[in-house]
Image (tube, rainbow, N blue to C red):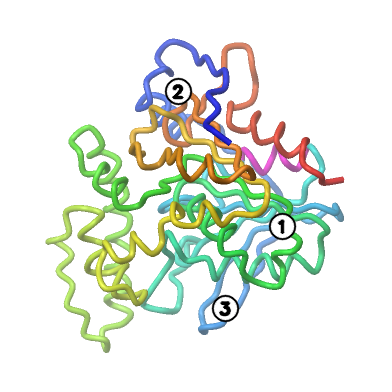
Amino acid sequence: MSFIVPDYHPFLFFKNGHFNTIWTFLFRKKVALDFERIQFPTFDGDFLDIDQIVTGSSKCAILVHGLEGSSKSSYMLSLAFQLQIVGWDVVLINLRGCSGVPNKLFSAYHSGKTDDLVLVVNHYAKLYSYIVPIGFSLGGNIVLKYAGEAKGDGFNKINSAIGISVPIHLSSTSDKLQRLENRMYSLRFLNSLKLKLKVKLRMFQNLNQDIALNSIRTIRQYDDVYTAPSNGFIDAEDYYTKSSSLSFLERILIPTLIINAQDDPFLTSKCFPKHNIDNNTKIKFLAPKYGGHVGFVAEFGKKLPKHEEWILEYLSQINCK
């Protein structure tokens, strides 16, 4: 299936990708939801903190946040609220180190770490007839890679997969974040990541990790000295190559929705891989002209952010009853 450019006509300034991105990050209303927090032990001695709303529905949406996000991110809470209204139970994953408590290992989460999603899906597959993983940005890459890998006993309960603002080609998006116009985003990410790494270096002094925090100026450098080696990759480029969902798109065998805005300041042309999409009829790829990065502010007179409107419409069309 080729790209679809859906109708989306945001008001005035929101036709600028940066404005749509920043406005929604700063001003998207945080919905208060009554979650139950549970902790999952992982196979390697670590843990995941999961926030869930379980009401007895037969269908469950599993949400995965983006880089340095959490279950408290406004885009996670907003979508969870809308899904609950239309009858879905909702599970929000806090990736390792993102729940407000440092995880137990020197390594943390990364863009291609699907094993933790497999663990969560396998658990909830015992409780639900239909499961849909939904990922934002980095979490979207995890979800799409998982959909292509089809790993775990619980995968047979996966009815579809959804990714929003997905950096399908990690290497080029990492480089794009270093451009001058994106410097404010990369600095925010880096400051948060480096603070966490500083804590890790104190926790694991016995490992004698030779990492000079002050020398890390870019996301690629951070991934070179920490993310890649702590997760068994040679360097950042090896990590990007093996973790990018681009390589897994043609393997996806379940209905999948991808929403990437053409004016997303994080994404490159390689995140709109027409050849891979044309070769897989299971994928529906929405490429609206506007939207920014996890922005998609509601159109004038409408209540829902546009991506949530598309997601709810898509879920109503797939075979979940």
Residue 74: x %, y % from top left? 54, 40
Question: Horizontal placement of 152 versus 106: left or right?
Answer: right
Who's the residue at 64% across and 30% down the image? Answer: 310
Q: Which mark is residue 290?
A: 2
Who's the residue at 37% across and 20% down the image? Answer: 16
Residue 249: x %, y % from top left? 52, 52
- What residue is pinned by disc 3? 42
Please state which amino acid type lies under the numbered disc 1: Ile
Q: Nearer the viewer, mark 3 or mark 1?
A: 1
Range of the magenta residues? 78-85
Q: Which mark is residue 158?
A: 1
- Helix, strand or loop under label 2: loop
Who's the residue at 26% across and 42% down the image? Answer: 176
Rounded to the nearest angstrom, the CA distance separating label 3 from label 1 is 21 Å
Residue 195: x %, y % from top left? 29, 61
Q: Mark 1 Cα within 10 Å, few/some/many (few <14, many 20+)? A: many
Please state which amino acid type lies under the numbered disc 2: Tyr
Rounded to the nearest angstrom, the CA distance separating label 3 from label 2 is 39 Å
Residue 221, quarter of the rendered image: bottom left
Query: Is residue 289 inside the magenta stretch?
Result: no
Rounded to the nearest angstrom, the CA distance separating label 2 from label 1 is 30 Å
- Helix, strand or loop under label 1: loop
